[in-house]
Image: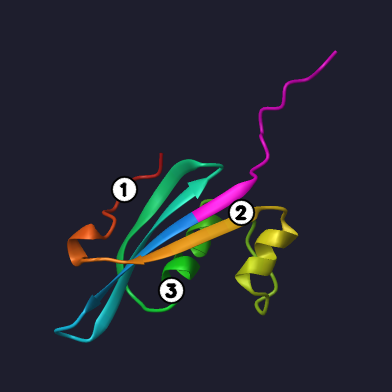
Amino acid sequence: MTTKTTNKAKRSVFIQGRTWFDRANGNTYNTAAVFVDGKFKFSLGMEYGYGDTWKNRAIDALEERGIIPAHTDGGKYWISRFTDIGLDFYSCEQDVKKNQLFKDQDEN
């Protein structure tokens, strides 16, 4: 007899980040869309931040939503955390115009 597994293990996380530089004020803003196993999960609205801020925000949101376990060792880099829990991690960043930033969407 075989049993049907209802809690399918997650295999991959993809975060698409978008950044916009406000030249008038010299600030950078970002948004992110998060996909798990190829399916859209949620997006994060526009927030101030440069560099990998969009990636860190998305990872924090994945933890808050219980999609990935919260890390307990403050010093570990995010890529090592995905490896440790057995997930493939992918990301990309695009510099866009303000109107091309992701809009807030509810989690599906």
Q: In terms of sequence position, does the residue under pointer 3 or pointer 2 come before the other?
A: 3
- Residue 91 left/right relative to 85: left
Q: Relative to the observer, which residue lies in front, 94 or 31?
A: 94
**Which residue ends up furthest to the top in the rendered image?**
1
Task: Residue 13: say if magenta.
Answer: yes
**Which residue ends up furthest to the bottom in the rendered image?**
26
- Which mark identifies residue 68? 2
When asked about the image quadrant of residue 50, the answer is bottom left
Q: In terms of sequence position, does the residue under pointer 1 or pointer 2 come before the other?
A: 2
Residue at point 26% right, 54% down? 103
Give the spatial CA distance, label 3 vs label 1: 19 Å
Disc 1 vs disc 2: Cβ atoms closer than 8 Å? no
The answer, for residue 67, to whether it is visible in the render is: no
Three-letter amino acid code at the position of disc 3: Thr
Region of the chain picked out in magenta, as a range:
1-14
Residue at point 29% right, 78% down? 28
Three-letter amino acid code at the position of disc 2: Ile
Element carrying mark 2: loop
Element carrying mark 1: loop
- Which mark identifies residue 53? 3
Q: In terms of sequence position, does the residue under pointer 3 or pointer 1 come before the other?
A: 3
Tell me if mark 1 has few (under 14), some (14-19) or many (20+) residues whose alpha carbon lies within 10 angstroms of its own.
Answer: few
- Which mark identifies residue 105? 1
